[in-house]
């Protein structure tokens, strides 16, 4: 890497000198060099281009598109465009003016004809329960032709049109962006006059779930470190042949499907599972333990699944530490503990950093394992993302929760970088 | 009732495009297409309804299956190449699609009049096809003293063991209120008030340490069979199937059970509307409906049909008057309005 850099800077320096000197052969040499450099860079770029393109299409693009859905809000505005424009003039304290009421009547009539009322009604119902049928009932009840005041006509169909909160929901849904989903992901909501308040106590959930997600990930990371460090140490101190054979035992679960490993835990832990049957038959217990659908089961299964990500970087780093270092420390009078702590352990720190980061960030996104072996109060944030994405088809909410998880992860990464330093991490 | 998982919509869409390309003449001449839930249910329908209908009327018809979902119906109508005529839908799709104008209005005069059918099987856009229930289920071999109602579901002293309920607020809030002594007729009136929702959640909280949750209709009989739980809420058809195929002795409590109705609808603008109406008239005949329950334990919707059904299947039939009168109709209007908020509250409650 360093050699390449100096060659490049050398090339630039030569090109710079060549530009100053007018002599023809020299200049063409500089040009040739520069051209060669350019070609090399292009080749390098073209070689990596498929990967870049692949990442762009399959990773950055979809993630970006999903995350924008947490704030983009056009379902209502595209079905009822006129009232969405009119409501912008509204200040939010009293009922809107006659023109806004008239615009709503016009839009609902047009949308009803075109069959586009449903998505708008669904969107409003996210905000206020009962808004779905209010919009459809309004569509059915519209007087044709309208006589007199549009405001009176609407309030006659349903008195809710005379309430400021109703128009607040329309204002919040008028797009093109909304804070509804992002606020809801933080257990917050907006009032008609634009203030932000906490969600009702019995609907608060996501802040708690986010904290739980980080709690579980932290616990699993600590467990992986406590189990993985001694294991890697033993492996690294064995002769290479034995170590390689034992390493297969680490790698075998690593190569096995996550679903299989999680199901294996169910077989072990369930009511009539291996552990309970063994204990019952041996007469140790009379009533089977409730082992499954508990936090402890989540910790056990996730630690099992993620352990190789801790062991492998640690093992690679420990293999590279010459045994002479500790021997030298001992011969200079250090106790074994001091030798380990001041000479050996610091050399494994970059690998510890790598293992901790890999395990922790993977654990944050866990979904299947807690869903299968955990109880209802062990579910992590990904469970709720899946709930909104595939059960209720509320993409706004799914995207907002993803955004919350991503933001929290990036923030944590930043803190980690400040405290430990990302550049100190060695993957292997 | 969604049983099969065949996916015909993609093929149907291709067929639709082909029809559109081939032009109107071909589309006019296509046979009547009837879409149902597939699986054992549709096999029974073939024998009881489809084949006799074709023989008797001479009308050519084809049957397909789908997995439900209002989005599928919306997409069909919006594509302008809808090739379905008669579709069986769940009550939620019926309410949504009728509001959105996806279905033709039913001419009840051609079906003998609204009053000939169960009240909840009649609507502007649909004719009820089957009735099925959420019942309290238990293993008759393990529980000797017969539970009588959802109140016994809450009685963990008398009936020790875990309980399984469907994950989600729908059906559980109703069950909780009934268990708390609310007369079934007042359940939705109460649930429309914040105090009623609080009461339902408080009642569920009492049982929470003993609750586990199912998500697929096939799970409750499995949970009963494994001994994991003592009682479940379950579809009556699943319990009956477990008794029949796995030789179990599962019992059902009909008192306070919840029922819903699937309906036949005619898709808006169907070129086969006349034949479709003939089909609906045929499948609504009591003489034809009476043949369905012996094959699959779903209730039928014509008032006169249940009396004609084979007496052997009557005790476990949702439309047996004794069962029907003891059960509560699941109010889809209520759930369409309130599911978003109550889902949120249920998830928050569950996660605590």
Image (cartoon, rainbow, N blue to C red):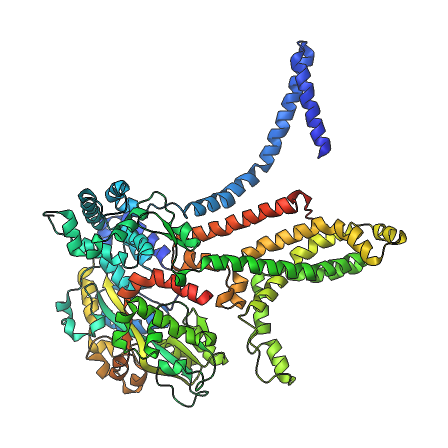
Choose top left, top right, bottom left or bottom right for residue A141: bottom left
- B26 and B64: which one is in front? B64
Q: Eyeballing the image, is B30 above or below B228?
A: above
**Numbered circles on residues, count:** 0
Residue A273, image x and y in percent?
58, 76
- A412 and A249: which one is in front? A412
Quadrant containing the N terminus of chain A is: top right
Residue B196, image x and y in percent?
31, 70
Residue A54, image x and y in percent?
53, 42
Q: Going by the image, does A225 lie left or right of B290?
A: right
Give the residue drawn at x 41%, y 57%: A388
Q: Going by the image, does A307 lie left or right of B152?
A: right
Which residue of the protein is positioned furthest toward the right in this rendering? A331
Q: Going by the image, does A167 lie left or right of A12?
A: left
Q: Going by the image, does A389 lie left or right of A147?
A: right
Any part of residue A351 in sight: yes
Give the residue drawn at x 36%, y 56%: B11
Which residue of the protein is positioned furthest toward the bottom in this rendering? B144
- A318 and B248: which one is in front? A318
Choose top left, top right, bottom left or bottom right for residue B249: bottom left
């Amino acid at each position: 890497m360093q050699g390449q850099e100096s060659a490049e800077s050398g090339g630039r320096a030569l090109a710079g000198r060549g530009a100053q000197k007018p002599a023809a052969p020299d200049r063409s040499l500089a040009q040739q060099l520069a051209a060669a450099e350019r070609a090399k860079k292009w080749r390098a770029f073209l070689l990596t281009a498929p990967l870049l393109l692949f990442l762009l299409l399959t990773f950055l693009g979809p993630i970006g598109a999903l995350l924008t859905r947490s704030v983009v809000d056009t379902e209502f505005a595209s079905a009822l465009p006129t009232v969405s424009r009119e409501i912008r003039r509204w200040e939010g304290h009293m009922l809107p003016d006659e023109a806004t009421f008239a615009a709503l009547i016009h839009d609902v009539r047009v949308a009803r004809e075109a069959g586009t009322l449903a998505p708008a009604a669904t969107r409003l119902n996210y905000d206020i329960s009962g808004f779905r049928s209010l919009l459809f009932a309004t569509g059915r009840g519209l007087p044709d032709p309208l006589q007199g005041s549009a405001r009176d006509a609407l309030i006659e169909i349903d008195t809710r049109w005379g309430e400021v909160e109703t128009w607040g929901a329309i204002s919040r849904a008028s797009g093109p962006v909304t804070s509804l989903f992002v606020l809801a992901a933080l257990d917050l909501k907006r009032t008609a006059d634009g203030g932000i308040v906490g969600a009702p106590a019995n609907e608060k959930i996501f802040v708690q779930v986010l904290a739980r997600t980080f709690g579980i990930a932290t616990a699993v990371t600590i467990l992986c470190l406590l189990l993985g460090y001694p294991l890697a140490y033993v492996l690294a101190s064995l002769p290479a042949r034995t170590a390689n054979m034992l390493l297969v035992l680490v790698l075998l679960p690593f190569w096995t499907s996550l679903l299989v490993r999680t199901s294996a835990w169910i077989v072990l832990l369930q009511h009539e599972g291996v552990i309970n049957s063994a204990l019952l038959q041996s007469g140790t217990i009379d009533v089977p333990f409730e082992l499954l659908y508990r936090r402890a089961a989540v910790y056990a299964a996730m630690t099992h699944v993620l352990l190789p990500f801790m062991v492998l970087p640690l093992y690679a780093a420990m293999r590279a530490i010459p045994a002479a270092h500790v021997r030298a420390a001992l011969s200079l009078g250090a106790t074994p503990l001091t030798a380990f702590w001041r000479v050996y352990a610091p050399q494994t720190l970059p690998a510890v950093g790598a293992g901790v980061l890999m395990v922790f960030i993977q654990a944050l996104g866990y979904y299947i394992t807690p869903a299968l072996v955990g109880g209802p109060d062990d579910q992590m944030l990904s469970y709720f993302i899946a709930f909104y994405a595939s059960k209720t088809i509320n993409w706004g909410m799914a995207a907002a929760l993803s955004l919350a998880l991503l933001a929290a992860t990036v923030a944590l990464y930043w803190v980690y970088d400040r405290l430990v330093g990302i550049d100190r991490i060695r993957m292997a | 009732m969604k049983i099969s998982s065949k996916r015909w919509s993609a093929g149907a869409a291709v067929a639709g495009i082909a029809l559109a390309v081939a032009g109107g003449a071909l589309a006019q001449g296509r046979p009547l297409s009837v879409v149902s839930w597939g699986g054992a249910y549709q096999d029974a329908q073939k024998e009881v309804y489809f084949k006799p209908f074709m023989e008797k009327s001479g009308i050519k018809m084809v049957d397909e299956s789908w997995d439900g979902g209002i989005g599928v119906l919306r997409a069909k109508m919006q594509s302008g190449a809808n090739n379905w005529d008669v579709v069986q839908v769940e009550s939620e799709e019926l309410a949504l699609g009728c509001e959105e104008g996806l279905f033709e209005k039913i001419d009840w005069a051609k079906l003998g009049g609204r009053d000939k059918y169960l009240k909840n099987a009649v609507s502007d856009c649909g004719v009820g096809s089957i009735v099925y229930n959420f019942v309290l289920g238990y293993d008759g071999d393990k529980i000797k003293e017969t539970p009588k109602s959802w109140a016994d579901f809450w009685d963990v002293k008398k009936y020790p063991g875990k309980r399984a309920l469907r994950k989600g607020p729908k059906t559980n809030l109703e069950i909780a209120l009934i268990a708390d002594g609310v007369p079934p007729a007042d359940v939705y009136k109460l649930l429309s008030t914040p105090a009623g929702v609080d009461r339902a959640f408080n009642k569920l909280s009492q049982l929470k340490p003993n609750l586990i949750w199912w998500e697929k209709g096939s799970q409750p009989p499995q949970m009963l069979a494994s001994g994991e739980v003592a009682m479940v809420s379950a579809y009556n058809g699943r319990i009956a199937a477990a008794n029949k195929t796995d030789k179990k002795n599962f019992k059902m409590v009909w008192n306070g059970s919840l029922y819903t109705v699937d309906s036949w609808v005619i898709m808006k603008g169907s070129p086969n509307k006349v034949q479709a109406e003939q089909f609906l008239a045929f499948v609504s005949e009591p003489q034809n409906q009476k043949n369905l329950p012996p094959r699959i334990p779903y209730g039928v919707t014509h008032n006169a049909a249940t009396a004609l059904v084979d007496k052997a299947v009557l005790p476990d039939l949702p439309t047996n008057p004794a069962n029907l009168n003891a059960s509560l109709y699941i109010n889809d209007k209520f759930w369409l309005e309130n599911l978003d908020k109550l889902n949120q509250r249920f998830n928050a409650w569950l996660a605590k």
